[in-house]
Image (spheres, grey):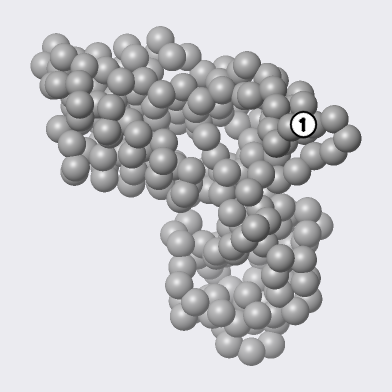
Amino acid sequence: MKIELLAFGITKDILGGRQVSYEWEGPANVEGLLLSLREKHPQLADLKSLKVAVNSEYAGLDKTIGPQDEVVLIPPVSGG
Amino acid sequence: MAENFDIQILDSPLSAEAAISFVQSDSCGAIDVFIGTVRNHTAGKTVFKLSFEAYEKMAVQEMEKIAQQAADQWPVDKLAFHHRVGDLAVGETAVIIAVSTPHRQASFEACKYAIDTLKQTVPIWKKEFFEGGEIWVAAHP
């Protein structure tokens, strides 16, 4: 699967930009994306948490990802 | 958005007066206000500025959910929920929540629920700039 990935907070620093073209082998779902990302960018595995939003809703690991979806990395939030 | 909620993410200074004036209601005897400001130190280090960024579309949606959840649990008449983004100096306001309810206890509880939940679910991130470095807050265990 190949997507345009949006990254905020510390994930923007780790991936090297707000918007990154990302391609991975394996399942086209949140779990597949996270497994691939953690392998390619081990610093992501050091975070307290890493969630994924698909089309601006928090998504579970089994959520399917398609090329048209807006996929966003959500590291630990710290608003307020 | 429900018309009794005023939810905004702004890159300009927040106004407590605007939030309070939005929630004022003749049927309510209480307005509780929370104002979160930039503190000049963290873990023994001197902080000189904070920078906030938001995934705005989703942040507004999540703030709406929180407002609705507060209204489901307490008799909230109106709720204003404003968060700042961009660079903030020490003393500036990062977040304002104002809630009006008929009686005071519910306004305290609804306001506390809103700020506590914001810190857990709303996709907004804060970077602290201090002497000798900068850090994304809460990113690591």
Q: Is residue A74 above or below residue B52?
A: below
Locate the C terminus of chain B by quadrant.
bottom right
Locate the N terminus of chain B by quadrant.
top left
Q: In the rendering, at what x and y percent does residue A34 appear?
A: 63, 75
Q: In the rendering, at what x and y percent does residue B72 appear?
A: 19, 43
For the question of whether residue B57 can be seen, the reply is no
In this orientation, which residue lies closer to the viewer: B138 or A35? B138
Q: In the rendering, at what x and y percent does residue B69 appear?
A: 26, 45
Residue A24 left/right relative to B70: right
Which residue is rendered at x = 56% and y = 79% of the image? Answer: A31
In this orientation, which residue lies closer to the viewer: A67 or B72? B72
Which residue is rendered at x = 60% and y = 82% of the image? Answer: A32
The residue identified by callout 1 is B45
Q: Is residue A48 above or below residue B95?
A: below
Q: Quadrant of residue A39?
A: bottom right
Q: Chain of mark 1?
A: B
Q: Is residue A69 above or below residue B34?
A: below
In this orientation, which residue lies closer to the viewer: A50 or A55? A50
